[in-house]
Amino acid sequence: MKLIIINGVNLNLLGKREPKVYGNQSFEAYFDQLKKKFPSIELFYFQSNIEGELVNKIQEIGFSFDGIILNAGAYTHTSIALHDAIKSITTPVVEVHISNTFAREQFRHKSYISSVAKGIIIGFGLKSYELAIESFLN
């Protein structure tokens, strides 16, 4: 199985940014743990703060991977372009959020990704990514 985790805007600051919301661990350290926990899965990782680069990556791998785990960050709530990119590919996408977006500001309650995602995992911290991987295994 071949999966990719795609993280969007500001997620390069995990471990530094708002530790009360996002924790103290960098995503790179967590990604190493995921690769050890799931050795039979080919796991890849991509992060960008640039919306167009996220769209390009989704289009690039959207027909050749078994799944995409996408945390688009704030682009979740603003990007019709990401919605359309996901809608145009055959690879299933699981939308992930580290925090419970419904317990936060009102503008975070709307997702342009949810309607084209296979499923959504919200609010379980970094474990949300592990749950997303497990969703592809089941």
Image (cartoon, helix red, strand yellow):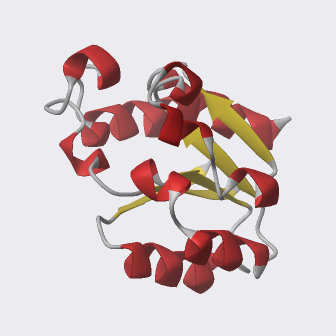
Q: Name the residue furthest front.
A: 106
> In this orientation, does residue 117 appear?
yes
Tell me: residue 22, above or below residue 106.
above
Q: The C terminus lies in which quarter of the figure?
A: top right
Image quarter (top left, top right, bottom left or bottom right) of the N terminus: bottom right
The residue under the point 26% across, 50% down is 10
Q: In this image, 35 relative to 13: left or right?
A: right
Q: Residue furthest top?
A: 20
The image quarter in which residue 30 lies: top left
On the question of residue 40 being in view, the answer is no
The residue furthest right is: 138
Name above or below for residue 129 compared with residue 50: above
Locate residue 104, reporting x and y percent.
46, 24
Q: Quadrant of residue 36?
A: top left
Depth check: 69 or 50 in front?
Answer: 50
**Residue positioned 18% across, 33% down in the render:** 17
Q: Quadrant of residue 49?
A: bottom left
Q: Nearer the viewer, residue 1 or 59?
A: 59
Residue 40 lies, in percent from the top left, at 63, 44
Decide if residue 22 is on the left or right side of residue 134. left
State left or right for residue 101 relative to residue 84: left
Please give left or right for residue 133 compared with residue 17 in the image.
right
Q: Residue 28 in the image: state x and y as whole percent.
A: 27, 43
